[in-house]
Image: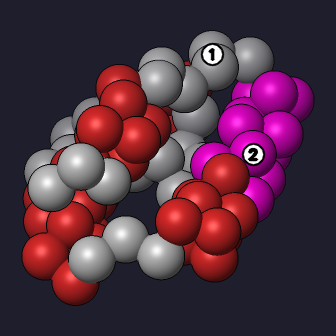
Amino acid sequence: MYCLQWLIPVLLIPKPLPAGLLHNHVVFMVLYLTGFFLERKPCTICSLVFLAAVFVLCYSGIGNCLLWGTPSCQVYKQ
C-alpha cells in the first residue's frame, strides 16, 4: 500500500475556478496519472482502491470529477 501515498493526494488537488484553466488542470491530471502508472507500476490493490475512489468521487455529484472538466459556473441546478 506504499503506492497509495502518491495517488490519494491527487484526489485532494482542487479544480481551478476560471474555465480557461480547467483544461490545463485536466491535462495535468491525465499526464501525471499516466506517468505515475507507467513509471511506478503500482500494485493491483492500490490501483483498484484508487480507481474506486475516483469512481465514487466522479459520480457523487456534478462537477466533482478530476478527470474531465465541468466548471462550477456551468452547473445547472434544478
Can you give x and y, in whole percent of width and height, for residue 60 in the image?
14, 51
- Residue 38 position (above or below residue 50): below
**Comes first in the chain, label 1 or label 2:** 1
Q: Describe the element under mark 1 as helix, strand or loop.
A: loop
Say if mark 1 contacts mark 2, CB within 8 Å: no
Can you give x and y, in whole percent of width and height, for residue 26 in the image?
68, 49
Q: Nearer the viewer, residue 78 or 19?
A: 19
Q: Nearer the viewer, residue 5 or 76?
A: 5
The answer to whether any part of residue 51 appears in the image is yes
Q: Is residue 6 magenta?
A: no
Answer left or right for 74 relative to 51. right
The answer to whether any part of residue 55 appears in the image is no
Between the residue at mark 1 and the residue at mark 2, the CA separation in whole angstroms equals: 16 Å
Q: What numbered label is drawn on residue 28?
A: 2
Q: Which of 57 and 36 is in front in this view?
A: 36
Look at the image and tell me in which quarter the C terminus lies: top left
**Residue drawn at point x = 22 percent, y = 83 percent:** 44
- Residue 65 position (above or below residue 25): below
Q: Describe the element under mark 2 as helix, strand or loop.
A: helix
* Residue linked to disc 1: 17
Answer left or right for 31 relative to 8. right
Q: Which amino acid does label 2 sit on?
A: Phe
In which quadrant of the rendered view does residue 38 lie?
bottom right
The residue sitting at the top extreme is 17
- Number of on-image labels: 2
Question: How would you classify the magenta stretch by its main secondary structure?
Answer: helix
Q: What residue type is labelled 1?
A: Leu
Q: What numbered label is drawn on residue 60?
A: none
**Residue drawn at point x = 36 percent, y = 30 percent:** 9
**Residue drawn at point x = 15 percent, y = 55 percent:** 1
Range of the magenta residues? 19-31
Label 2: how many Cα within 10 Å (few below 14, some 14–19, many 20+): few
